[in-house]
Amino acid sequence: MWDSLAFMHIQSAWGRSLINPINLLFHRFVDLDVTTIFLVSISLISLLFVIVSYKKLRTSYLIFCMYSLLIPMSSGFGSMPRFALVIFPIFIVLAELTKQRDADEVLTIILALFQGCLMVFWSNGFSLVI
């Protein structure tokens, strides 16, 4: 028998179900382990960055960004950094912001520190899902 919604039905095998992303954000702040804080913070940073830079993005890019963030968030925060990493309009806005030398240096330092933290987490065996 053909199941056209098999991709949705199989999500229960990974412990995923359809959840309101806003309720999930507030509920997840109760669980304060490193992995949850990392996943929620990446989700919030990506979402806030898209919302703040809506004037710099075309409407089609803004719709793509919101769709690409809210659909994965509606099933939980697992693998959220992986989903947020491929949203290319965020990189377009970052390129526009870093045309100024000061902003470029600040962003480079912040991202280098972030990469260092991820390396420390990885080498200590934290199970951050990326």
Image (tube, grey):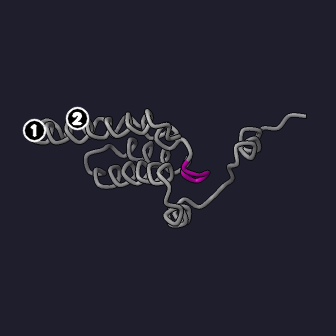
Residue 48 image position (x, y, % from top left): 35, 55
Q: Which residue is drawn at 74% across and 47% down?
A: 12
Numbered mark located on residue 100 in the image: 1
What segment carries the magenta color? 73-77
In the image as oriented, which residue stretches furthest toward the front?
A: 124
Residue count near mark 1 (Cα–Cα under 10 Å), binned few <14, some 14–19, many ≥20? few
Nearest the camera: 87 or 27? Answer: 27
Tally of numbered discs: 2
The quadrant of the image that shows the N terminus is top right
Whether residue 89 sits left or right of residue 75 in the image: it is left
Where 28 falls versus 79 (above or below)? Answer: below
* Above or below 26: residue 99: above
Residue 95's label in the rendered image is: 2
Whether pointer 1 and pointer 2 mark residues with C-beta atoms closer than 8 Å, the reply is no
Q: For residue 118: magenta?
A: no
Main secondary structure of the magenta stretch:
loop
Looking at the image, residue 55 sits to the left or right of residue 5; the answer is left
Q: In this view, does 129 lie to the left or right of 42?
A: right
Count residues near mark 2 (Cα–Cα under 10 Å), then give few for <14, some for 14-19, many for 20+. few
**Residue 23 placement: quadrant:** bottom right
Residue 86 appears at what percent x and percent y? Answer: 43, 33
